[in-house]
Amino acid sequence: MSGVSLEARELSKWFGSRTAVDSVSFAVQEGEVIGLLGPNGAGKTTTIRMLSTILSPTGGDFAVAGVPSSRPADIRARIGVLPESAGYPAFQTGLEYLMYHGRLFGLSRAEARQTAVRLLKQVGLADRAQSRIATYSRGMRQRLGIARALVNNPSVVFLDEPTLGLDPAGQREILTLVRTIAEARGTTVVLSTHTLPEVEQVCSSVLILNQGKVLASGSVAEVTSTEAAGHQSGRLRVPPEEMARAAEVLRRVPGVSVEVLKDVVTVTSADGMNNALSAVLDAGLTVVAFEVDGARLSDAFLAMTRGGTS
């Protein structure tokens, strides 16, 4: 049975009078991929920097694989990090780069080489092991960065915007790799991203921050259904001769916006779709069809962070 691999308790960070992270608490299980979401300035990167021991918390504490934040050196041995703007030595090969970092973690030269070869294969760079990093594409460098984050066989890996600037094919490659890391290695992955569909594809849970505070946490399904249940859209079909009347009735319903296109009325409601449908039926109109779109994480995110820093 898996246990908690990462836990934060009332984690806070202040920069002078500005509060960047405000009493953030959450727990992540082994092998879980958690999406860390929030608009710019929400506190995501500051949270990652604290959890990876780059910054010291102003308040609260955390633990990685049971190791408390009071032992940062021991935590660093148990984590891997891919920062948003990672730098790479242009004239080293991919193999040399990974071997160098393996040696920094105390591996013998033979162990470092074996680890580097294995990781390059895992991230799909085996055929470019002897190529200089200067010849790598951005997507290849991101995969190399993920391999670097795995050199020490960490319990937790922090990936800060790993798909930023990649084309759709490159994004898919990285997301597939993230899923593999969690499923095959049992490693916990903290994925910070602005791209919500990525979270829906690979994350088992989500933590949404805004202005340094936790707005929601839980599984993607829980957050989506709970926070976005009231923000829905759908399509209503009525006989052509009743279209104008249906649109008029719906526009009187509080919180509802209406768009008429051909024989379909598209309805968006801030309070769920029941009131909109009831209003049409109460007006004696004939409902030929009524389709409600499924709630999405993007709906929940926008609903919760509206009015926050962007």
Image (spheres, rainbow, N blue to C red):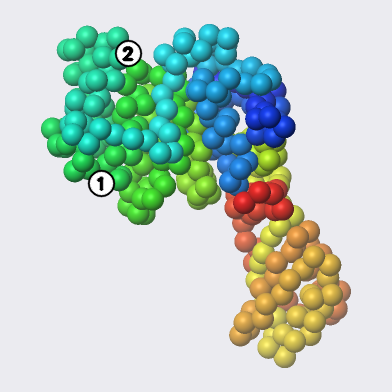
Q: Earlier in the sequence, mark 1 or mark 2?
A: 2
State the residue lying farthest toward the front.
16
- In the picture, measured across the screen, residue 255 lies left or right of residue 152, that is right
Tell me what residue is drawn at x 75 percent, y 87 percent: 244
Between 168 and 15, the one lying in front of the other is 15
Q: Amino acid at mark 1?
A: Ser
Judging by the rendered image, the residue that carries numbered circle 2 is: 105
Q: Quadrant of residue 102?
A: top left
Q: Position of residue 43 (x, y in %)?
A: 61, 36
Cα separation, mark 1 vs mark 2, equals 27 Å
Q: How many marks?
A: 2
With respect to residue 287, does 37 lie above or below? Answer: above
Residue 137 numbered mark, or none = 1
- In the picture, measured across the screen, residue 283 lies left or right of residue 166, that is right
Q: Quadrant of residue 293?
A: bottom right
Between 67 and 43, the one lying in front of the other is 43
Q: Position of residue 72 (x, y in %)?
A: 51, 12
Q: Quadrant of residue 109?
A: top left
With respect to residue 232, does 212 lie above or below? Answer: above
Name the element at disc 2: loop
Q: Amino acid at mark 2?
A: Phe
Q: Position of residue 226 (x, y in %)?
A: 71, 45
Label 2 environment density (alpha carbons within 10 Å; few <14, some 14–19, many ≥20): few
Tell me what residue is drawn at x 65 percent, y 34 percent: 20
